[in-house]
Amino acid sequence: VNMGTALIYDEEMTRYKLLWVDPACKIEVPERLVVSYGALVENGLADRCVSIPVREATDADILLVHSEEYLEAVKKTPYMTLEELKEFTLQYGDVYFHPNIYHCAKLALGATLQLVDNVMTGKVRNGLALVRPPGHHSMRSAASGFCIFNNVAIAAQYVKQKYGVKRVLIVDWDIHHGQGVQYSFEDDPSVLYFSWHRYEHQKFWPNLRESDFDVVGKEKGAGSTINVPWNKVKMQNSDYLSIFFHVLLPVAYEFSPDLVLVCAGFDSAIGDPEGEMCATPDIFAHLTHLLMNLAGGKLCAVLEGGYNLKSLAQSVCQTVHSLLGDPAPRPANLEGPCNSALESLQCVRSAHRKYWSCLKHAGSLKYTLIVNVLSFSTIRENFIKDADDKDAVTLSSLIALVDKMEKNEVVLTRDLLYSNLFFYISVLSQGCSDASGFIQAVLGLLLPLGYEYDPSLVLLVQTPGSGICDSVWQQLTGLLQGLAQGHILVLMQRTCIDPTCSSLLGDAAPSLGQLHAAPPEDVEAVENLRQRLKADWKLLQTTDEPDD
Ligand SMILES: COCC(O)(O)CCCCCNCCCN
Ligand SMILES: [Zn+2]
């Protein structure tokens, strides 16, 4: 059941700003919150959310990550003169202090903890905390990058301590590397930290060697830090989606988190002076949607960066639309990932191959994945029979149609042809359906194909004997709703009405639990098919090698 989406915001957090000249900090202005919240109100989204009040974080909350000496130092800032504030600020990088920033930093952290409390206790399903100062750069004893307290890092420690949460996934889609988060969990296998960031071979701020793809975590935490460096600017939607399909989502499903925290920075959107990327605000509807079937839908997004007020406001609205369960806009005209993105993708996958079974290739065939992309011409030449001109494609005719498609005697009624290309994937799994093999096929093959194809309708058919268990079926039904603006038609030849309906009604699919290594034959099946198809379907590429 959909318990709703929390929105946590308090205008007190707009009451601090830069009081002196500092070119590095002038972009971090109070208007960032004003326009974000304003846009949610204007678009009728604020009213559809459950409004949860902020609270002040306690010392105990702050000390989950930060040191006593750092907290004691920050506590003195409200009483400092302008000169003392400037002096105090000099010891840190790309950050500024203000008499009211300590208060606002406690509210930003308090807002974040209110959000995770309400999600963990089931008051709401998911939510967004619109906060400043942001958090992901601040470290145990240092402020950095406009950040005072590390809101998301503290939230992860907080839920582990208070709710005994075993595994937390942190997705940092801000365009900067959240080094503060990485440092907090680099040896902690219970927190998986994923970050992509503008890097340009260490030439971009914060210019850290440890932001590169080969830094994967330490000791027990090896494999639980995933760094995706963008070594060029102007990355687009398909670059972002490729990383989700071929790195983040396969690993996230294998990790099977109990909670997803998002460092929701929107400086990764087009128009942002910091990111200089080209991904459009609607991509955040898809990124959010693609994470919403993890952890039983428990997702807490916390604002980090975002400095172009127009694209920030639009990106925030796209994110909240998805949190509310609204269908995502069609991912129009996706090209393939650029070579630089493919290089990063390949580097990250190989750096993590030994930690995550989903990134391995081996074995022989179990799934026969039949992918027929039937274009107009193919259909017209080879398949059209003298189909009578039905006015409406009735369900029975669709079922009859699908039966024929199963037998590859495709007869398409004329009006079905009018809905442009017809895209037909049948995932036949002989024998018991191993969830991980199937999910990896969905994430690494079906979704990239589907997003690139961008259908106006998704026809999902459950063939008898497919042996796909309900929770996997619900994951599939949920994930596919990111396509065709959610226009999905499910033909079931087996009674799994309830789980399907709950997924169609927007409920998150139940977690599949930690996924074991997929049977090698499944992995190979997907890999073979991906090799065959990637020449025509660019989103299937994971390397810039002609045949990886
Ligand atoms: C968590 O804060 C959100 C953020 O990651 O966006 C902070 C970015 C700090 C960027 C510091 N350099 C600015 C140089 C100005 N050209
Ligand atoms: Zn940022």
Image: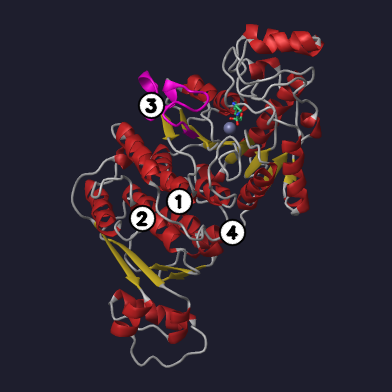
Residue tagged 2: 538
Residue 17 appears in view: yes
Alpha carbon distance from label 2 to label 4: 24 Å
Alpha carbon distance from label 3 to label 1: 24 Å
Within 10 angstroms of label 2, few (less than 14), some, or many (20 or more) residues? Answer: some
Query: What mark, if any, has residue 129 been given in the picture?
Result: none
Residue range in magenta is: 195-221
For residue 339, side relative to residue 134 (left or right)? left
For residue 80, side relative to residue 222 (left or right)? right
For label 3, the SS is: loop
Q: What secondary structure prevails in the magenta region?
A: loop
Image quarter of residue 62: top right
Alpha carbon distance from label 4 to label 3: 34 Å
First-in-chain label (3 vs 2): 3
For label 1, the SS is: helix
First-in-chain label (4 vs 3): 3
Which quadrant of the figure shows ligand 2?
Answer: top right
Residue tagged 4: 327
Residue tagged 1: 238
Look at 78% across and 21% down and name the residue there. 19
Amino acid under label 3? Answer: Val
